[in-house]
Image (cartoon, rainbow, N blue to C red):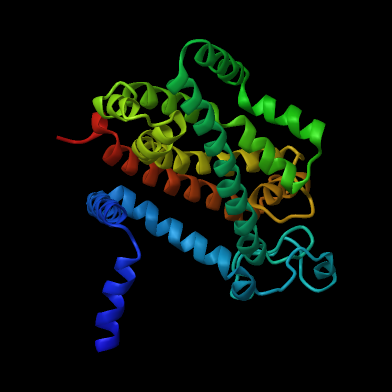
Amino acid sequence: MKGASVGAPAARSLLPPRQREKLRLLTKSAKKIWNQFRKNRAGMVGLGILVIFFTIAIFAPWLATHEDPNSTSWAAINPIYAPPSLKFLFGTDYLGRDVYSLTLMGSRASLIVGVVASVISMVLGTLIGVFSGYYGKITDEILMRFTDFFLVIPWLPLMIVFVMLLGASFTNVIIVIGITSWPSTSRIVRAQVMSIKEHTFIERARCVGASDTRIVAKHILPNVFPLIFANTILLIANAIFSESFLAFFGLGDTQVISWGTMLERAYNSGAFTSFAWWYILAPGGCILILIMAFYLIGDALDEILNPKLRRR
């Protein structure tokens, strides 16, 4: 016990007083946001759903009934289009594969696309928004016209063109979704940066000789980050839908199991006309539920972090 009591102050002493104060304020702010988020029932429902899906994705190989649900060797063993039963919880597909196992494994690809593509989008949108809002004038004009180009062209046809040019690999799909969904983030960041840079603490930082890089890193980004985070949550939902859209139209990686490729195979194999509703409901329902969860969380965070939307 003495060692623990001595070790805690020693660990705290590694940080200078200013950094300890910043850490204390950051922790206090995070607790305040969490306490406000807990009061939002819709947000908590979305968070619960999200935890379930991430748990399924992590433990999918152990929860699945077959270690290789994408294998075509099942056709000689299991009946095709078998309805849900105790043996096949979600039924079987046109090759006799267990739809339950396919759905579990598909959660991994869909979540990876959603998270990685949204991170790419967040980084691009933040960089463009910060440079545009902070420097203004000609820089703002050029970057906003570039942003308008992506906003004017419908993003779904634009993604299709990029995927056809780069190839329908899993990596390319993630990159394409990331580089076509950043404009909304850049607009939000630009508006916030233009507002924050007029505050007196920014002027004081300039007067004491702080560089633009330091001002952006130490003063602007920390104030903009909460809204960036809330918007990124919504971008994940958009990325999951985009991957499903591309895969359904045959522009996904056929070697990777995802909910989108499951729907594409269901359509091509005649599941719609064969009334094999379980083959459609499992991936389609997961897509809808997961997107809804991200939107519930995003709306809750936006309500907390955006003063204009807070309930009074």
Q: How many marks?
A: 0
Nearest the camera: 117 or 97?
117
Q: Identify the image quadrant of the N terminus.
A: bottom left
User: Which residue sits at x=55%, y=42%?
Assistant: 118
Q: Is residue 293 left or right of residue 116?
A: left
Nearest the camera: 46 or 26?
26
Q: Is residue 1 visible?
A: no
User: Which residue sits at x=24%, y=32%?
Assistant: 307
User: Which residue sits at x=22%, y=35%?
Assistant: 310
Residue 225 position, x and y percent, is 39, 39
Indicate whether 259 appears above or below 143.
Answer: below
Nearest the camera: 92 or 119?
119
Nearest the camera: 286 or 194?
194
Residue 33 position, x and y percent, is 26, 49
Q: Identify the image quadrant of the C terminus.
A: top left
Residue lying farthest to the bottom in this orientation = 1
Q: Is residue 81 left or right of residue 148?
A: right
Residue 105 position, x and y percent, is 65, 62
Q: Is residue 141 visible?
A: yes
Residue lying farthest to the left in this orientation = 312
Residue 68 position, x and y percent, is 75, 69
Residue lying farthest to the front in this orientation = 209
Q: Is residue 294 left or right of residue 37?
A: right
For residue 311, what is the image quadrant? top left
For residue 224, what is the image quadrant? top left
Q: Is residue 179 left or right of residue 251?
A: left
